[in-house]
Structure formats: C-alpha cells, structure tokens
Image (spheres, rainbow, N blue to C red):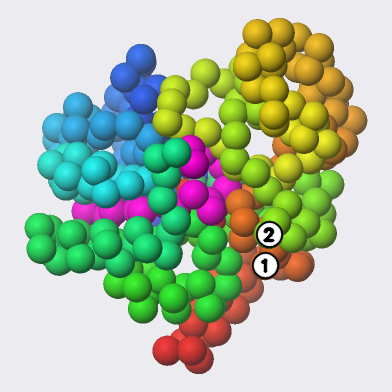
Amino acid sequence: MSAQPEALARLGCGFITWRLDQDASALDAMLAQAHKPAAMMLSFGDPRPYAARLQAAGVPLMCQVQNLAQIPWAIEAGAAVLVVQGMEAGGHGMNALQGRGTFALVPEAADWLTAHAPHTLLLAAGGVADGRGLAAALALGADGALIGSRLWACRESLASEAAKQQAVVTDGDGTARSAVFDILRQKNWPEPYDFRAIRNGLHRQWEDRINDLRADPDAARADYQDGVAAGDFERAHATVGEATGLIHDLPSAQDLIARITAQAERIR
Ligand SMILES: Cc1cc2nc3c(=O)[nH]c(=O)nc-3n(C[C@H](O)[C@H](O)[C@H](O)COP(=O)(O)O)c2cc1C
C-alpha cells in the first residue's frame, strides 16, 4: 500500500461476521499485515469466536448490533465500541420483524452499557445525516454516530454518479428493506438480515413476490444485470437508507463532516 502513513494509521476494516463463520482466512490475512487496521468492525453475527484473534493482534474491536439481545455478545467479545444500528439504515440490517428503530434502541443500549459496560463507547447508526441527527444521537446517550448513507453520497465516494444523483432526488419515503436486491445479486444473506436501498422500479416489481423471485430468479437477475451495465437505477440498486431524504448535494467528505459537526454544536 502506498497511502500516507498518517492516513494508514487511521484506517479500519470490517467483516460480515456470518461470512467469517464460513471462511475466516481474510480476517487472518488482515491481522497478519505489517500495518494492522486501527480497528476492526464486525457486524451481523456472533463476534465472540473472533475475539481472541483480535486481542492477540492488538486490534480494537467495534461491534455493530441491531437489537438489545446482541449487545452481551459484543461485550463478551471485548468490543471497545458498540454500534447500534436501527432499521432506517442503508444497506444490510435486521428485517422488520426483529429489527429496531434507532430512536428507541440508542437510549436503551446506553442504559444497558451504563449498567454493565460503562467504558464501552456507543455509536448510533441509522438515519443520521446532518447535525440534527448527530445532536439527537448524543442527546439519546450515544458518544457519536456512524454515518453511512450521507457519506456514500459525497464527492470522493466511488459509487456511480447516476446512483448518487438518484439519492439526491429521492426522499425518505423512497427506500425499502427487503431481500429483493440480495436475491438479484446472488448474495445468500441468512435471516434475520435483509437490505435497504432505493425502492426502484425493479424492486417494486418483485417486492410482493419474494418467494416467486427466489424460486425463479434468472430473468429478473438478467434484467438487474442489464440495469447495472446501463447505469439504469430503476433496475440497478442505489444503497441508501431513509436518510436519503436529507441528501440534497454531493460535497466533499471533509465539508460534510465539518457541516454536520458545526450544526450539531450549534444545537447543543
Ligand atoms: C453503501 C453502504 C454500504 C454499507 N456496507 C456495510 C458493510 O459492508 N458492513 C456493515 O457492517 N455495514 C454496512 N453498511 C451499514 C453501515 O454500517 C451503517 O449501519 C449504516 O450506513 C448507518 O445508517 P445510515 O445509512 O442511515 O447512515 C453500509 C451502509 C451503506 C449506506
């Protein structure tokens, strides 16, 4: 890697935990690097089997959880940072049956940590896109926020410009959480997880017929692939959560962070 040393020193890395249960060689390769990640985030599964390896490598653990029941796993695994993710979030998360909303989950998690693990830092994830969201997360007892969708829609993001423009013009009603895009992309995510993205034409076509899509996905997958190749985001997916309704421009990441921080400071 040719990155500047000071940038490299701050670079973290994340893995999907249920995938490590099938093959953890990428985790081992990462921990064997001369430049170890500044932190490792594990999401979507039980992090405890990987705790000893991270501890031996001296890499701090961040655990992202989606409900209260998962918090003790994270604490037993030695998480220095707990990220609690509400269902508003873009990308993968917990489905509607078992998932929680950020606004009630964060204070409940904060109370749990106060009682059981007061030194663990708490980050709110899901729906935070401006200073109001950050100030709210802090007021709810978090130490900060993990911001995904808003930073995906910034100048440096490698997402396609058409996808980013889709996020700019879509309001917060315009996303949905389902298995549709996982089936179309042949991603075998286990329950209870699914995926939030913009609810485009192809999603609407299949969202009420998930079992039919699973049973006979070929034509829909071809349609999706054509959409990806054409940069047509009525068929290809754009990965943002409900916070897309708060995305109106595509500034640099640095400007975004400064803007969010300044607005939160004014409110507090
Ligand atoms: C484009 C995108 C990709 C994501 N990829 C991952 C991922 O690989 N692993 C993960 O744990 N979470 C992932 N997430 C979820 C984030 O960790 C976080 O929970 C979420 O973005 C917070 O909600 P927000 O999108 O409303 O800010 C992703 C989110 C987005 C928007």
Check disc 2 and report the residue beneath it: 172
Q: Which mark is residue 246?
A: 1
Q: Is residue 215 left or right of residue 124?
A: right
The answer, for residue 136, to whether it is visible in the render is: yes
Give, as a three-letter code, the residue at label 2: Gly
Q: Is residue 84 magenta?
A: yes
Sequence-earlier tag: 2 or 1: 2
Q: In 3D space, how far apart are the residues under numbered discs 2 and 1 (Cα atoms)? A: 8 Å
Q: Residues within 10 Å of mark 1 (few under 14, many from 20)?
A: some
Mark 1 and mark 2 in contact (Cβ < 8 Å)? yes
Give, as a three-letter code, the residue at label 1: Leu
Q: Position of residue 67 (x, y in %)?
A: 33, 47
Q: Position of residue 257 (x, y in %)?
A: 55, 71
Give the position of the C terminus as an image quadrant.
bottom left
Q: How many marks?
A: 2
Q: Position of residue 157 (x, y in %)?
A: 67, 51
Camera-side residue: 98 or 112? 98
Tell me the residue at 14%/32% (across/down): 52
Secondary structure type for disc 2: helix
* Range shown magenta: 80-96
Secondary structure type for disc 1: helix
Image height of 79 relative to 257, above or below: above
